[in-house]
Amino acid sequence: MSYSRYLAASSFVPALFLLGLPGETHFYIDPGTGSLVLQAVIGGLVGTLVAVKIFWSQIKGFFGRLFHVGKKRTEHEEHED
């Protein structure tokens, strides 16, 4: 099956679904939705902070090796002189 036929066939079902929807829809967001979104954002931030705390020594070691490569070479060269 060619790509264009696959694309046409795969877009046929969603098109039928959209045709079955009513013309006018009215959405209501209850007050609990705002608190749910706030909880999700706070939970994501706290989760990120906990992950950083758990892996802090590995993160610190990675950046330490990344930025101190040149410094170690100069210290090693000074000891050889």
Image: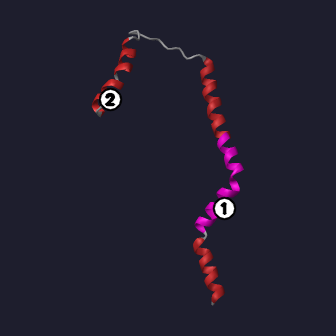
Q: Amino acid at mark 1?
A: Gly
Q: Which of 38 and 44 lies nearest the eye of the viewer?
A: 44
Residue 3 position within the rendered picture, expressed as x and y whole percent measured from the top left: 30, 33
Q: What number is the disc on residue 19? A: none
Residue drawn at (32%, 29%) of the image: 7
Q: Main secondary structure of the magenta part?
A: helix
Image height of 47 relative to 67, above or below = above
Question: What element does badge 2 sit on?
Answer: helix
Residue 62 position within the rendered picture, expressed as x and y whole percent measured from the top left: 62, 61
Residue 77 position within the rendered picture, expressed as x and y whole percent measured from the top left: 61, 84
Q: What number is the disc on residue 61? A: 1
Residue drawn at (65%, 35%) of the image: 42
Q: Amino acid at mark 2?
A: Tyr
Q: Which of 69 and 19 lies nearest the eye of the viewer?
A: 19
Question: What element does badge 1 sit on?
Answer: helix
Image height of 31 relative to 44, above or below = above
| Image quadrant occupied by the C terminus | bottom right
The residue range painted magenta reads 47-67
Q: Is residue 58 magenta?
A: yes
Residue drawn at (64%, 25%) of the image: 35
Q: Is residue 50 magenta?
A: yes
Between disc 2 and disc 1, whose residue precedes? 2
Residue 9 position within the rendered picture, expressed as x and y whole percent measured from the top left: 33, 24
Task: Find disc 2 in the rendering and name its residue.
Answer: 6
Residue 45 figure quarter: top right
Image height of 75 relative to 20, above or below = below
Rate crowding at label 2 as few (under 14), some (14 to 19) or many (20 or more) other CA atoms within 10 Å: few
Distance Cα–Cα, label 2 vs label 1: 50 Å
Residue drawn at (68%, 40%) of the image: 46
Residue 2 figure quarter: top left
